[in-house]
Image (cartoon, rainbow, N blue to C red):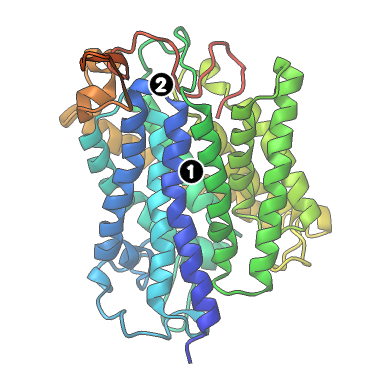
Amino acid sequence: MVPTGDTAWLLASASMVLLMTPGLALFYGGMVRSKSVLNMMMMSFGALGLISVLWVLWGYSIAFGNDVGAGMLGDPFEFFGLRGLMEDLTSEEGGLPVMAFVAFQAVFAIITVALISGAIADRAKFGTWLIFAGIWATVVYFPIAHWVFAFDAGDVVGGWIANDLLAIDFAGGTAVHINAGAAALALAIVLGKRKGFARDPMRPHNLPLVMLGAGILWFGWFGFNAGSAVAADNTAAVAWVNTMTATGAASLAWLATEKIRDGHATSLGAASGIVAGLVAITPSCSAVSPVGAILLGAIAGVLCALAVGLKYRLGYDDSLDVVGVHLVGGLVGTILVGFLGTAAAPAGVDGLFYGGGVDQLWRQVVGAVSVMTYSFVVTLIIGYLLHKTVGFRVDEDDEVSGIDLAVHAETGYDLHVSTGAGRTLTGATAGATGSSGVGADADRQTEGSVKS
């Protein structure tokens, strides 16, 4: 008999995670300048459409097909087009319909690709972004999902991180966040800096959108983490509580860092801290106690708040701080399992601080570094090939005047004032001129200020 309660929870969780991608579009869209808001949001929605199709055709099979290469890759043809899966009710543990698991993992693939786009805001060709997204998902995300999420089951052999290394990544700290953060760094290097980077004001054009997006992400993340229990059980409940707790602690820690360093606690900092906490607790929500989650979230909030200023020191233009939040936050959450893990939590592993020694710690480090290295190197190659062939960056004039108008023939805010004589006067056409410094992404004008 199909466990209807668990199936309902998994499908509901998948729907919550799907909502995270529009939430991310709002979050990213509010942080860029007004002349780029539509293009920024379209990159998320483009990923949503494209990866939905690729996941059905070969993505699921590469990620969860029977291994064909020493834990590195699933058979891409085994479930091509989800062949043979509509009637199978026993492939997943507990008799869950396999199509429910297909749906849940699909939305993970979608948002991972969408996360990368924040690093190349204001300057990427939309068509090339879609080409990149399809190639990257196929050769980077789908194989890494196999490494991390595909567990051995009967005669089916899964990935090396899940089954051989035994690193703990409950909901995607490596496969999603470290993966996307490393790819974001590579693409930022390939595309180069925006015109006026570190010189012109590039402030967020709509902070209420940022706050709304952060709230949607926090809501959807309960499906992301608690849904990864693949059952409506105690593990899901522990993951839910730890997700709430770590996220709150991270937001407070980010705000405290801002206040001490800059003299102000900002709404952007609150939203950024929320995302940092969500990222950090993702791999560890089944492995730490609620008190451990508070400590982990606080550490992530401080470190990510400090990390977003590195791009000025190191000279790369990660527009919306995907590296500072997702790569750093993912590394913090993954590695701290080796310190804060407790056998009392569902994962059942003691870290260094609980008498477990360094056994789990080295496993966490190897898993994190392996994903980061593979993602960065392969993304760098894909990005350079596309940049040198079809071109990845828009023309300088289009970047300056407004990428929305140049690429999509639209503007985010087309405001008109109607006169008494029936004549319409243009009051403001956001994004058409780019003459105002207002409306930039999460960058501040001064080095070391807090962004997301």
Asked which secondary structure carries label 2, the reply is loop
Residue 298's quadrant in the figure? top right
> Is residue 376 at least partly visible in the picture?
no
Name the residue carrying label 1.
372
Q: Outermost residue, front direction?
A: 420
Name the residue carrying label 2.
33
Q: Which mark is residue 244?
A: none
Is 287 in front, or is 122?
Answer: 122
The location of residue 117, given as percent across then percent down, is 38, 36
Instruction: State the CA–CA distance, disc 2 to disc 1.
Output: 30 Å
Determine the residue positioned at 43% across, 71% down. 101
The location of residue 311, given as percent across then percent down, is 51, 21
Q: Amino acid at mark 1?
A: Met
The location of residue 108, given as percent across then percent down, is 44, 56
Q: Outermost residue, bottom direction?
A: 1
Q: Is residue 240 left or right of residue 224?
A: right
Decide which of tag 2 and tag 1 comes sooner along the chain: 2
Q: Is residue 91 left or right of residue 306?
A: left
Q: Is residue 59 above or below residue 193?
A: below
Is 130 in front, or is 384?
Answer: 130
Q: Tally the marks.
A: 2
Asked which secondary structure carries label 1, the reply is helix
Q: Amino acid at mark 2?
A: Arg
Determine the residue positioned at 30% across, 57% down. 52
